[in-house]
Image (cartoon, rainbow, N blue to C red):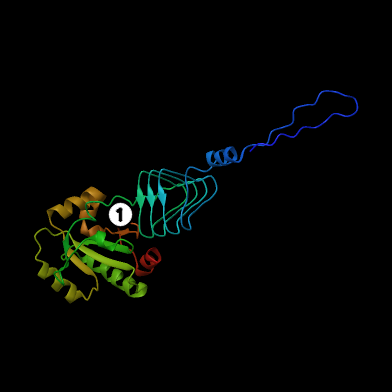
Amino acid sequence: MGLVVMFALGACGGAAAPAPTAMPAKAMADAAANTAMPKTMTDTHMMTGTGMMDHGMMTDTHMMTGTGMMDHGMMTDTHMMTGTGMMDHGMMTDTHMMTGTGMMPDMPKLSALQNLVLTDAQTGKMFKLADYLGKTVYVEPMATWCPNCRAQLAQVTSAKKQVASDNVKFVALSVEVGLDPAKLAQYAKDTGYDLQFAVLNADGLKALNDAFGQSALNPPSTPHFIIKPDGTMSALVTGPEAAAALVMKLK
């Protein structure tokens, strides 16, 4: 119930001025309801900075910071989006994290040579150079009839002993089309070269040529190259290299 309070004027005899009216209790409640936030955040979620979450859901102990924005999407488990990352109409799962500008770097596109299926001449197991992503790979195209190859592979074997790391692989690829893998395995045994040997087929020769040109198919020039842990390949190097020089490149 509203209460009107009137104040009398002094002895001057002037007319009484109207007093302010108190707001009814129901009107105060309605006004408070109209100013309530239309959306809520539940559990232990926190949004800081200028982050905005619109029509979406953030669950468990998730946190969005900086100027990150998640629109119509869902972030689950222990994910975190920071910096200016933005996730739009998508979902990030498990324990993944998006940082900085919200973009993960793309992996390099692997060449046909790296994706070529090879057969280990000594074990008979199939493998690809791409299997060694995360490791450094030294690759030497060679031929069993090539004396320069023998001299260079001796240096490579010596370098392998000095590096002595599971994170560095050594592969010798025979460019002799139609060579029996058993003969290549015998070559490895006779020379004592502790390397992984495989014979390139016609597709392999084409892939090698596409990647490095004709020089890679000329064994006497002792062509060789290195594949970095991220999958990128170095330029082709020709000519002999001593074990010490190879070790410096591979460490």
Q: Nearer the viewer, residue 241 or 137?
A: 137
Instruction: Describe residue 208's horizontal placement relative to residue 108 as left or right.
Output: left
Amino acid type at image mark 1: Leu
The C terminus lies in which quarter of the figure?
A: bottom left
Residue at image location 14% in from the left, 71% down from the top: 185
Q: Nearer the viewer, residue 212 or 62?
A: 62
Q: Is residue 105 visible?
A: no
Q: Nearer the viewer, residue 237 or 26?
A: 26
The location of residue 28, given as percent across then percent down, is 60, 40
The location of residue 108, given as percent across then percent down, is 32, 51
Residue picked out by circle 1: 236
Residue at image location 24% in from the left, 70% down from the top: 195
Instruction: Describe residue 61's horizontal placement relative to residue 216 as left or right.
Output: right
Disc 1, SS: loop
Residue at image location 60% in from the left, 41% down from the top: 25
Determine the image quadrant of residue 155.
bottom left
Q: Is residue 97 visible?
A: yes
